[in-house]
Amino acid sequence: MAAAPWALRAASFVVVFAAWEYAGRLPVNPAFPPFSDTLVAAGEMVADLSLVAALGVTLWPLAVGVALSSLAGVAAGVAMGLSRRAEWLFVPVFIVLQAAPLAALIPILVLAYGVGLLSKVMTVCIMAMPVIVLNSFKAIRHAPSSLIEMGHSFLGSRRQIIAKVILPAASPVIFAGLRLGLAAGFIGAILAELLISPTGIGDLITYHQSVADYPKMYAAIATVIVLSVLFIGLLDRAEIALFRPERRSAR
Amino acid sequence: MNRVVALRAGPAVAEPMVEVRGLSKVYPGGVEALSDITLNFPKGKLTTLLGPSGCGKTTLLKIVAGLIPASAGEVSVGGRKVTGPGPERAFVFQDFALLPWATVLRNVAFGLELRGTGRWEREATARRHIEEVGLKGFEDAYPHQLSGGMRQRVGLARALAVDAEVLLMDEPFSAVDEQTRRKFQEDLLALVAGKGKTFLFVTHSIEEAVYVSNRIVLLSRRPSRVSEIIEPDIPRDLPPDRIRRHSAYIDTVEEIWQGLKRYLE
């Protein structure tokens, strides 16, 4: 039984890639290359280092933006969950931010911060922050009241109850927010490179599209997707290692 | 025949450990849960709060625990007025309230952990109580790997580990299956006999109350008052099967049922 989930996962990839290959060969659109061509293009771009260099450029604003959003976002969300006053002050702001079409704000960011790294970091932040904050807030607010009551009855101080009961109980939902925030951060980083100034992966996508080298364009897009999935998987493992030992043994 | 103690503060059978004086509780929104309750809980005995569902039994227990404030009146434990939770009281929760991310060992030691007891000492104490409740070998298991009955044994061991003089048990066996419940009740009798601790026990099961209690406090429907105090005259040194067939056991169950029936109409 233990091998079956892996076999199924592999099968799921095979199905998607086969469908991609088939659609590319039909072709559904001259601008849609089959999977094999894209893979070859990706190989070439790794070999001539253009893909690696582009990733190096793109990952900077992404890493800085996601790190800032995670730290500030979790802190703000936890504060809002623990204090009614912070909740009334901040929740409306983040609900509006979450509902707003944030890509439309990018021109304003460019006006304010120029076309450099800062604007791109800000783009990543406005995409990633709301979901991280709101998830952290809900996670804290929904920590089981019976566990909190148990903490009080066994004489836990407020600090102990927060650190030993509320935060571990909230960690699954906080991490779900971080995963969504990371995915949104990837969108922000690519949007910034497409809308603010073409650098990194965004530049590769724009350039290869303009010279109609579609396999390379798709290779650049696929690389971002693969990277995003990889990071989200890593975050999952970090959570289980740090906060949820019982899920380690459940696997 | 059972001794039916007079209403309100009865004669002191034993030295009272927990005293409740003129206690009332009105929840925000105007629901009156308890009305002018005066009660003594004798030291070293198991006293059960029994009454129709929603009558405020759990509210009374949580006020004694210091988890919710009273609207009027006061509670004292061992002569000291209750203003919040204290080290001389330990609570066993209806829903177990175990930390799902902590092992049995850490859960049982959690009360001591919150008190700042060193790791080595608290784990040694926890191991002793895990063995006492019959969970030896499960120290490193997580709650989701245990049955309901085993989880409540963890909850009980956690309460025993802090060595409180008063154990407050809120329908501790209501979420476990019938067979496990019977075994629990037998173990509880041994615990009461062997520990010299004072037990406050909440249940809605008449049979359970009569089987385990030295003293049963019948509460009326909301707003709760003390309607009757019964001390079942059952020899506690009999084996379990003899107790359940003892005429005093059967008569007391029937007597309480007749008393509670009027609240159901």
Image: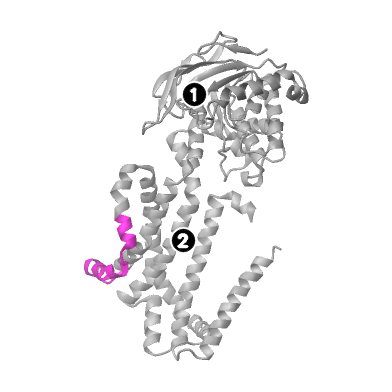
- Could you say which is closer to the camera, residue A1 or residue A230? A1
- Could you say which is closer to the camera, residue B218 or residue A172? B218
Q: Which residues are magenta?
A: A93-116
Element under label 2?
helix
- Residue A109 among magenta residues: yes
Residue A154: horizontal and vertical position, in percent? Answer: 52, 31
Give the residue at x 59% y 78%. A15
The number of discs equals 2
Q: CA distance from mark 2 to mark 1?
A: 44 Å
Q: Mark 2 or mark 1: which is in front?
A: 1
Residue A14: horizontal and vertical position, in percent? Answer: 60, 78
- Residue A52 among magenta residues: no
Chain letter of disc 1 in the image: B
Mark 2 crowdedness (10 Å alpha carbons): few <14, some 14-19, many ≥20: many
Asked if residue B49 shows in the view, the reply is no
Q: Amino acid at mark 1?
A: Val
The residue tagged 1 is: B64
Tags 2 and 1 both on a single chain = no
Chain letter of disc 2 in the image: A
- Residue A22's place in the image compared with B144, above or below, is below
* Quadrant containing the C terminus of chain A in the rendered view: bottom right
Residue B247: horizontal and vertical position, in percent? Answer: 73, 19
